[in-house]
Image: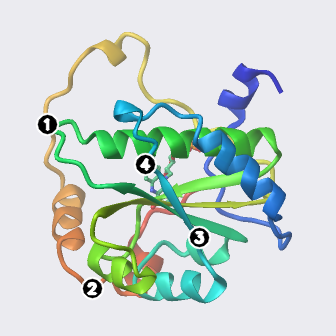
C-alpha cells in the first residue's frame, strides 16, 4: 500500500474475527509507534499489553465494550509532564496514530479508545505507577468486515474558520459523567454512540 492508501484506508474498527494477533505483529506495531516524534525526544511511551481477564475487568469498570471484544488491547502510558501544551499527550498520540497506520498496512483493524474507567480505577487495576499518565487503550484485530468509509464533515474552507462554542445537553451530560468515578457498564451499552465499523 502506498502512503496515501494507508492514510485513507485507516478506519476505526470495532468488530474483529477470532484470529489472534501474534507477537511478531505486535512488535511491528510497537516499532512503528516508537518512530513517532516526541517532545524533547523523550520517547517516554510505555506499553501495557492486557490479558483477557484485564480486558474483561476494564469493561466491567466502564470501558467501551470493544476493549473486551478485541484480540489485542494495549494501554499506552507516558510520563507525566508539567508542559502547558500537554506535550506528553501529544507525544503519546503521535505514537498511537503510527501504530494504527501500521495496523492498516498489515491488514489489521484498530481502534483508539478513551472511553475508559475513571483513571484512578484503571491505574489501580493495572498497577500503573503514579508518574505515568494513562493516555489511551488501543485495540487491534483482524476486521470482520471491510470497514465502511467515514466521511469528513468540514469543507476545505471551513477548516480555516473558527466556530462559536456550542453548549449541548450531550456535552453537559458528558462533562458530569466523566467526573464521577462509577461508569456502570449498562451506560456504555445503552447510551454510548454506536459506530458503523
Ligand atoms: C482520542 C480518541 C478517542 C477515541 N475514543 C474512542 C472510544 O472510546 N470508543 C470508540 O469506539 N472509538 C473511539 N475513538 C475513535 C473515533 O470514534 C473515530 O476515530 C471516529 O469515529 C472517526 O472514525 P475513523 O477513525 O474510522 O475515521 C477515539 C478516537 C480518538 C482520536
The quadrant in which residue 65 appears is: bottom right
Percent position (x, y) of residue 146? 80, 48
Q: Is mark 3 within 8 Å of ligand 1?
A: yes
SS under mark 1: loop
Q: Earlier in the sequence, mark 2 or mark 3?
A: 3
Q: Which mark is residue 182?
A: 2
* Residue 7 at x, y percent in the picture: 66, 29
Identify the disc placed on residue 44.
Answer: 4
Residue tagged by mark 3? Answer: 66
Describe the element under mark 2 as helix, strand or loop: loop
Residue occupying image coordinates x 32% and y 82%: 121
Question: For the residues marked 2 and 3, what is the alpha-carbon distance in whole angstroms?
Answer: 19 Å
Q: Which mark identifies residue 64?
A: none
Which quadrant is the C terminus positioned in? bottom right
Q: Which residue is mark 1?
A: 165
Locate residue 161, reporting x and y percent: 25, 15
Amino acid at each position: 500500500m502506498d502512503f496515501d492508501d494507508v492514510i485513507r484506508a485507516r478506519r476505526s474498527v470495532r468488530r474483529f474475527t477470532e484470529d489472534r494477533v501474534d507477537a511478531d505483529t505486535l512488535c511491528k506495531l510497537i516499532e512503528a509507534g516508537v518512530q513517532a516524534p516526541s517532545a524533547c525526544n523523550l520517547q517516554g511511551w510505555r506499553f501495557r499489553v492486557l490479558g483477557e481477564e484485564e480486558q474483561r475487568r476494564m469493561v466491567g469498570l466502564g470501558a467501551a465494550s470493544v476493549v473486551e471484544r478485541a484480540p489485542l488491547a494495549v494501554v499506552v502510558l507516558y510520563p507525566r509532564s508539567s508542559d502547558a501544551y500537554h506535550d506528553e499527550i501529544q507525544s503519546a498520540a503521535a505514537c498511537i496514530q503510527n501504530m494504527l497506520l501500521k495496523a492498516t498496512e498489515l491488514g489489521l483493524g484498530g481502534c483508539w479508545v478513551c472511553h475508559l474507567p475513571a483513571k484512578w480505577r484503571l491505574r489501580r487495576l493495572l498497577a500503573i505507577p503514579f508518574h505515568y499518565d494513562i493516555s489511551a487503550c488501543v485495540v487491534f484485530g483482524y476486521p470482520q468486515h471491510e470497514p465502511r468509509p467515514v466521511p469528513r464533515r468540514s469543507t476545505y474552507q471551513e477548516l480555516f474558520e473558527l466556530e462559536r462554542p456550542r453548549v449541548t445537553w450531550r456535552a453537559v451530560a458528558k462533562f458530569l459523567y466523566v467526573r464521577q468515578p462509577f461508569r456502570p457498564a449498562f451506560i456504555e451499552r445503552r447510551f454510548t454512540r454506536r459506530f458503523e465499523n
